[in-house]
Image (cartoon, rainbow, N blue to C red):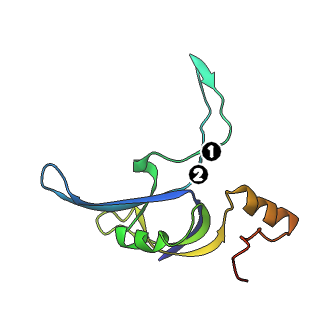
Amino acid sequence: MFKLKALIFGAAAAKGISKVNKPYDYGILLQPVPIMTWKNENGEGKASGFKTPDNQDALQCTSDMLHSINQIELPAYLELEMVPHEYDIKTLVCVGFKMIAHVPTKYEQFESLYTHKPINKPLNSTL
């Protein structure tokens, strides 16, 4: 088993029978990858920032593992448990994870994080 720490933006899974009556069962984890710059004899392209990979380039996971990842809010920084794929040992599949940190995406979460002020709770909430 291998451990991998990664920022995960999203996750998806599918399970069923295809149109040609072939069963499928897979999950993917979407992590940020740099947008590639390029240059050749015909021109060049510049880029900055990150994107999520195409599905075929995403991290693979079991669809069963995805049920537990649905319990956390993404994006998050995770420690992933990776094992070789049963049919292709060059491919790693995520079978479990441990949450390291949640990445805030809402203004209140950022404000609370950087000003050290608690998030305002509704008047009827309990502490």
Mark 1 crowdedness (10 Å alpha carbons): few <14, some 14-19, many ≥20: few
Residue 118's image quarter?
bottom right
- In the image, what residue occupies the spot 65% across and 67% down? 102
- Where residue 23 appears, x then y in whole percent? 19, 60
Which numbered disc covers residue 50? 1
**125 in relation to 46, above or below:** below
- In the image, what residue occupies the spot 66% across and 70% down? 101
User: From where the camera sits, is residue 41 visible?
Assistant: no
**43 in relation to 95, above or below:** above
Could you give the CA–CA distance between mark 1 and mark 2, rounded to whole angstroms?
6 Å
- Where residue 74 appears, x then y in whole percent? 57, 62
Please give left or right for residue 39 compared with residue 82 in the image.
Answer: right
Please give left or right for residue 42 compared with residue 16 in the image.
Answer: right
- In the image, what residue occupies the spot 87% across and 64% down? 115
User: From where the camera sits, is residue 10 visible?
Assistant: yes
Q: Secondary structure at mark 1?
A: strand
Q: Are marks 1 and 2 in contact (CB under 8 Å)?
A: yes
Q: Amino acid at mark 2?
A: Pro
Residue 88's image quarter?
bottom left
- In this view, the residue in front, 7 or 104, is 104
**49 in relation to 31, above or below:** above
Q: Tell me which numbered mark, 1 or 2, is placed earlier along the sequence.
A: 2
Q: Secondary structure at mark 2?
A: loop
Q: Amino acid at mark 1?
A: Phe
- In this view, the residue in front, 79 or 41, is 79
Which numbered disc covers residue 102? none
- In this view, the residue in front, 51 or 127, is 127
Kindly identify which residue carries mark 2: 32
Please give left or right for residue 118 compared with residue 47 in the image.
Answer: right
- In the image, what residue occupies the spot 62% across and 44% down? 50
